[in-house]
Image (cartoon, helix red, strand yellow):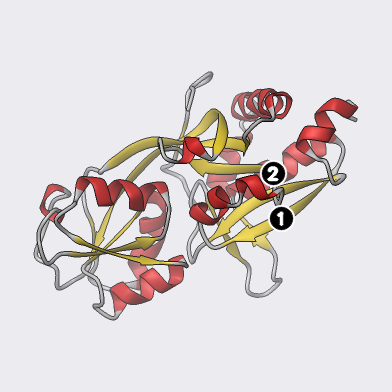
């Protein structure tokens, strides 16, 4: 059992409230809902449950539509730990521990779209869809300012928009797009990326004891093979585990 000072910061309700984001397909961050059982599955679920077990408390999954929702509720005492893509804007809302995943975001292009490179997305009239307030969508806005960016609250709504030709491309992590591509016949994942970052463990700001603990936990999870196993079990065979000691 963890000591009282740690639990006060990391599990103040007596449970570890693990913030997860859901999507139609899994990634190093996104979880999916099993339609048969209603259970949530994903890398963040596995890591959150393992952290709760180490603390000696129960894990409680707090479900969100995207990482932006998690970020924006960080000061509301609604969750205790999260596993999020890193960008400078998000660092204003949460404190990041070490990285567990090497992240690349790129575009899934509609069958009718004419462009074939990430750079070509930055063009007037190009419509790019993504989930609001995510690190990926923020970066796409910065790197393709001439395009029209169409934000969605949920990932499945963005996928539907591409399928229905309401947007020309989707901005997501490469892992997410690998799962989404079969849902949009004829679509293409572009080579290269517009965001190269990490996915890392995070806690709300102002909790140094909790931050130190989750950082040590992530390093243990990488060294023990738990992160690699979680990737593989979700079909993320090509996802890369961040090197030992890698900062966010």
36 lies left or right of 238: right
Please report the residue visible at 69 percent of the width from the left and 57 percent of the height from the top: 62
Give the mark nearer the N terminus: 1 vs 2. Answer: 2
Asked whether the residues under the numbered discs 1 and 2 touch, taking CB atoms below 8 Å apart as contact, a structural biologist would say: yes
Task: Please tell me in which quadrant of the rendered image residue 95 appears.
Answer: top right
> Which residue bears the numbered disc 2?
48
Q: Nearer the viewer, residue 28 or 93?
A: 93
Residue 103: x and y in percent read 40, 39
Residue 212 vertical position relative to residue 45 in the rendered view, above or below? above
Location of the N terminus (image quadrant): top right
Please report the residue visible at 66 percent of the width from the left and 30 percent of the height from the top: 206
Q: Which mark is residue 177?
A: none
Residue 204: x and y in percent read 64, 38
Q: Residues within 10 Å of mark 1 (few under 14, many from 20)?
A: some
Please report the residue visible at 71 percent of the width from the left and 48 percent of the height from the top: 77
- SS under mark 1: strand
Residue 29: x and y in percent read 52, 48
Residue 50: x and y in percent read 73, 40
Please report the residue visible at 81 percent of the width from the left and 39 percent of the height from the top: 53
What is the CA distance from the residue labelled 1 to the residue labelled 2?
8 Å
Residue 98 vertical position relative to residue 80 in the rendered view, above or below? above
Q: Which mark is residue 61?
A: 1
81 lies left or right of 27: right
Task: Please tell me in which quadrant of the rendered image residue 130 appears.
Answer: bottom left
239 lies left or right of 104: right
Q: Nearer the viewer, residue 36 or 218?
A: 218
Task: Please tell me in which quadrant of the rendered image residue 102 appears.
Answer: top left
- SS under mark 2: helix
Q: Residues within 10 Å of mark 2 (few under 14, many from 20)?
A: many
């Amino acid at each position: 059992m963890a000591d009282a000072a740690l639990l006060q910061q990391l599990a103040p309700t007596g449970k570890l409230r693990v913030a997860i984001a859901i999507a139609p397909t899994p990634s190093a961050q996104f979880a999916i809902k099993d339609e048969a059982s209603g259970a949530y599955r994903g890398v963040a679920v596995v890591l959150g449950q393992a952290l709760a077990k180490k603390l000696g408390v129960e894990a409680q999954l707090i479900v969100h539509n995207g990482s932006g929702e998690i970020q924006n509720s960080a000061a509301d005492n609604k969750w205790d730990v999260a596993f999020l893509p890193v960008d400078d804007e998000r660092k204003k809302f949460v404190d990041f521990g070490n990285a567990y995943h090497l992240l690349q975001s790129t575009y899934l292009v509609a069958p009718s779209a004419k462009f074939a490179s990430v750079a070509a997305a930055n063009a007037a009239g190009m419509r790019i869809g993504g989930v609001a307030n995510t690190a990926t969508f923020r970066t796409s806005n910065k790197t393709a300012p001439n395009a029209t960016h169409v934000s969605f609250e949920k990932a499945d709504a963005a996928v539907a928009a591409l399928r229905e030709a309401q947007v020309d491309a989707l901005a997501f992590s490469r892992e997410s797009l690998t799962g989404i591509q079969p849902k949009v016949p004829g679509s293409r994942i572009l080579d290269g990326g517009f965001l190269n970052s990490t996915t890392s463990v995070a806690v709300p700001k102002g909790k140094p004891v909790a931050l130190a603990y989750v950082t040590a936990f992530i390093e243990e999870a990488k060294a023990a093979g738990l992160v690699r196993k979680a990737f593989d079990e979700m079909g993320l065979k090509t996802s890369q585990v961040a090197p030992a000691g890698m900062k966010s």
